[in-house]
Image: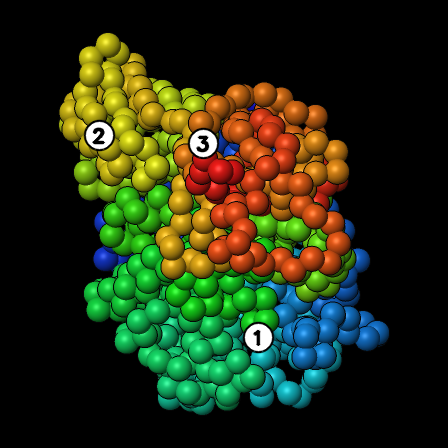
Amino acid sequence: MMSSALRPDDGTGPSGTAAVSRETASPVLPTPNASVRLRPLGLSGSRIEGGLWADRRRTNHEVTIPFGAEQLEAAGNLLNLKLAAGAGGTYRGANDDTGNTAPFLDSDVYKWLEAVGWELAQFPDQRLLALAEPIIELVAEAQRADGYVDSYYQAALPGMEFTNPEWGHELYVAGHLIQAAVAWRRGLGDDRLMSIAERFVRRIEAELGPGKRELICGHPEFEMALVELYRSTGEARYLELARTLVERRGHGILGPCRYGARYWQDYEPVRTALEPAGHAVRQIYLECGVVDVAVETGDHELLEAVVRRWESMTSSRTYITGSLGSRHQDEAFGDAFELPPDRAYAETCAAIGSVMLSWRLLLATGEVRFADLIERTAYNAVLPGLAFDGTHFFYSNPLMRRSAGAEVLEGPATTRRANWFPIACCPPNLMRFLASFPDLAATVSERGLEIHQYVTGSLDAPINGGVVRISTETNYPWEGVVHVTVDESVAEAWTLSLRVPEWCPRATVSLGTERLAESGPGTIELTRGWTAGDQITLEMVMSPRATAPDPRIDAVRGTIALERGPLVYAVEDADLPDGKSVESMEVAQAPILGDTFQSEPGLGELTWISLDATLRNDEPGPIWPYRNLQTGRASLAGGQRIRVRALPYFAWGNRAALGMRIWLPAIARKSDD
Ligand code: FUB
Ligand code: ZN
């Protein structure tokens, strides 16, 4: 149940804001001419009303976003904009690992504003509006007469605008400003941020638009934002600028950096690059812009190039959680199959970017594999980033924490969840992700309505000139049963498409007592004349399973992971006998798995998986950790046999104990063990 503070939008918008005609409230809204198969329903057409996502989204609205405003104040992000607006003082910003002041603090303000825009579009709330109003005014005051607005260059490096395309992040910051502006326009009919954003883009165009200096930004982001600006304003020159920037990339425009040109994807044109490379968030955000340009210009070759890299990414550079980026040093994709669990960087933003990319590819192609990756990533790579209390975050999301590992207290590699980060980055990205998440649940097409993500909620879809209204009820992801009720339909037949996830061996669909279809992974399409009151039940077989990694992922060879439905599981020290560590745990290669739905203090209701495990009696002290197999035994097995329980990975790190692992060493039992 939504609390009383979260009442659905009554359509009037916040008082005192300039009303413009409303577009569909969606972050990605292809034009009618775009080459896409599916179209978003937007936040007024796709609503989440109960279950796990409703809970996390309520925490986001009531706790995380207000907390974010406090942190933006405390960390200096707002102060910097005040300096740009003429106040006295010194620019504040944490140093990055090169010792330079991070130049992109404004982007966190814009991500936060975007989150508020999408939230207010769904749930009018004077408290949130009152937090956002002065910040919007502050951005307006900070903007210079020539349209430029970037507090770093205004307050810390005046006169140096557009001199450091590699690290300056100016277009990255502008991209986030545009996305916030799009949220406030589409969600609320409020154009104040939009006019600021357009004036800034004109200033940027004058500097590096077509026929001007051949610049690109070291951090992609502006490209996808520009396409959205084109979609919202109808101004073709924004699309042309996005296309130009996409085509410029890959020709060595940016100077070399210590990690090489792959770091910022300037080593190979986007049409010919075969693999994802370099900094994960940069690569993923670039891909989003490339897809947007491709579908708006009908450039199939460009789209195919992205799909090719998506396939390379998913087949060899994606963690089981859906996370991306195995290298801390440069926050980068590693080599193929370089996926260490304990040293995983797996930035929350890279996972959010992965969802953003797969959503665009889903709209473009209609292929269910993209919705599958969205599901895996949303549950197992994005959700873990936010603690249940709503005020602690993970930036990096490793798949293992050592029980006695070194405590890192600050920065992206914090061992425990942190309140905030010196360079915030991921928390406000989580806020905007959760705020706009319902948009990902379903789409509409020429054929009918497609349901991609299973939630309790309701959908309104324009079909055959009328409106189809659907409500869905489910206890997903804990159970695989989804009830779909047609509340209102149109006279003509239309197709209801239901995704059968990649993890599901078998699903059936019934209408009342009549069995309509049965399927493995893929899509069940039901075409008929639907009438109000029709009740469809989708039943997906959901049981715990053990998963083995590809042997080429050397770091986890000889282990298994536990999964159930869309969720990846982990074992935490908190669930072992006192003093025992997940590091000494061994399980069978094909364990017998049980599952129980139960409530746990601090964690709420979760389905746990149980299995037998051995906790080895590891020798204490400095012994040689290798054994001669000619003289020793094949396994260290022997120790305490216990029944252990695993929890959904997204719930880890909410209790005091440190140790956690997803991949469990699996021992083939031999008679002499
Ligand atoms: O450079 C801006 C952001 O900071 C990147 O997207 C993140 O990876 C973090 O490094
Ligand atoms: Zn981040």
Q: Distance of mark 2 from mark 3, alpha carbons?
A: 27 Å
Of the residues shown, which amino acid type is indicated by label 2?
Ser
Left or right: where 268 falls relative to 524: right
Secondary element at image label 1? loop
Q: Nearer the viewer, residue 586 or 285?
A: 586
Of the residues shown, which amino acid type is indicated by label 3?
Pro
Q: Distance of mark 3 from mark 1, alpha carbons?
A: 49 Å
Left or right: where 673 falls relative to 520: right
Quadrant of image for the N terminus? top right
Q: Can you tell me whether the CB of the residue at mark 1 lies under 8 Å from the nearest atom of ligand 1?
A: yes
Q: Which residue is mark 3?
A: 591
Q: Would you place residue 356 above or below residue 476 in this image?
A: below
- Direction front: furthest residue: 631
The reply to whether the C-beta atoms of the residues labelled 3 and 1 are less than 8 Å apart is no
Q: Which mark is residue 169?
A: 1
Of the residues shown, which amino acid type is indicated by label 1?
His
Measuring from the top left, give residue 641's x and y in whole percent. 60, 30
